[in-house]
Amino acid sequence: MEFVDRLNALSAKIRQQGPAIETEEATKIAFVMPFINSVLGYDVFDPSEVTPEYVCDIGTKKGEKIDYAIRKSGEIQILIECKKIGEPLNINHASQLFRYFHVTNARISILTNGRVYKFFTDLDAPNKMDEKPFLELDLLDLDEHVLPELQKLTKSAFDVDSIISAAGELKYVSQIKKEMAAQFSQPSDDFVKFFAARVYDGIITQKVREQFTTLTRKAAAQFLGDQVNDRLKSAMSGAVEPSYAMVAVQVDAVSDSPEEPAEDRVQTTLDELEGFHIVKAIVRAVVDAKRIVHRDTQSYFGILLDDNNRKPICRLHFNRSQKYLGLFDGEKNETRHPIQSLDDIYAFAEQLKGTVSYYQ
């Protein structure tokens, strides 16, 4: 099988079996070992290549283990720490990776929950693992830009110097894209001033800055829309036209005047769209993803089955300081649950899938 085919096969397995996985050990057996073996190409049954429960005593800490250590030419090259599927990944989960990283020859470490893989190296300080990954892979949302870099980590193509050389660019490009997305959605004062100073000749007072905040958001929305339209026109005409690099981000709608209809003043935020994709990833285990849609209103962001108001899956109440996830019971009564971050949505996976089951 080709590299991409193997990734797609594992992705399909996660969609099918993910809801039944309840432990970290089951996650490793069902998803992580196939990733190491089938995707990266290392023999998980050969301890000279893949060592499970690798022990590396550090100072007074004895007997602590890392989930997998991968060797190439007899040297440890990659360390892997695993969590249960669905569990959010953050730097607090990587404490053992930090400790082991500087006492082995490994230059690559991976934190994963079987679906999401975060790859780290030591760009910021030699032999000290960075706090931010240089590469992220979501097996249920494959990014074509990530795949060539992932392939460099496979047994047949492994070249640590090439990987480290590319890691710096990957890390910073990823961070710049996230910052651009944030600025296009909610421009900072510096971002607004940057453009205002180039098109406005007067003194930039507080009132002018507030005006240009709205204008900058509107210009960003129109700019991205123009790029999408240009791509569509090029595709339909068969022509290949140069275009700006597009940032995949939905920016908030901006009202021209207070007389606009209410539906035109609805603001769809990045958090709402990300929340939608999390819910979609959860419930697609029990229903075709094409049937899951969203409708935004001024009061809440609704997620529906079959674009039908009588089949609400949940509501995202994100237009306030405290975010709430609204869940429905069999009688379609809504209960709001406070959440601190978008990752908290995963804790309600079973309720969300149960709601969809009511309508089946």
Image (cartoon, rainbow, N blue to C red):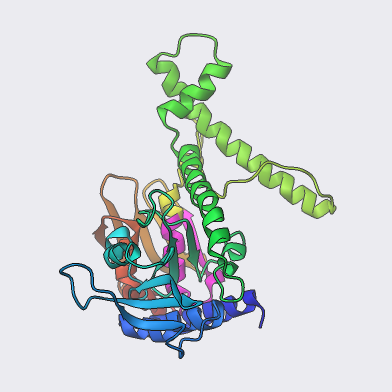
Residue in view at x 49 percent, y 51 percent: 171
Q: How many labels, in total?
A: 0
* Residue shown at 27% from the left, 60% from the top: 92
Where does the image place residue 320, in percent across and percent down from the top left? Answer: 30, 45
Q: Magenta part of the protein: which range?
A: 274-295
Drawn side of residue 197 relative to residue 334, left or right: right
As rendered, which of 58 and 84 lies closer to the eye? 58
Left of 230 or right of it: where is 124?
left
Which quadrant holds residue 187? Answer: top left
Residue 165 coordinates in the image, percent (x, y)? 55, 54
Q: Is residue 310 visible?
A: no
Residue 42 placement (x, y as % from top left): 52, 81
Q: 198 and 280: which one is in front?
A: 198
- Residue 288 magenta: yes
Q: Residue furthest right?
A: 238
User: From this viewpoint, which residue is outermost toward the left?
Assistant: 60
In the displayed structure, would residue 220 be above or below residue 93?
Answer: above
Q: Is residue 126 above or below residue 199?
A: below
Q: What residue is at 81 percent from the left and 49 percent from the top?
A: 240
Residue 193 sits above or below residue 159 on the image: above
Quadrant of residue 104 in the image?
bottom left
Can residue 293 be seen in this snapshot? Answer: yes
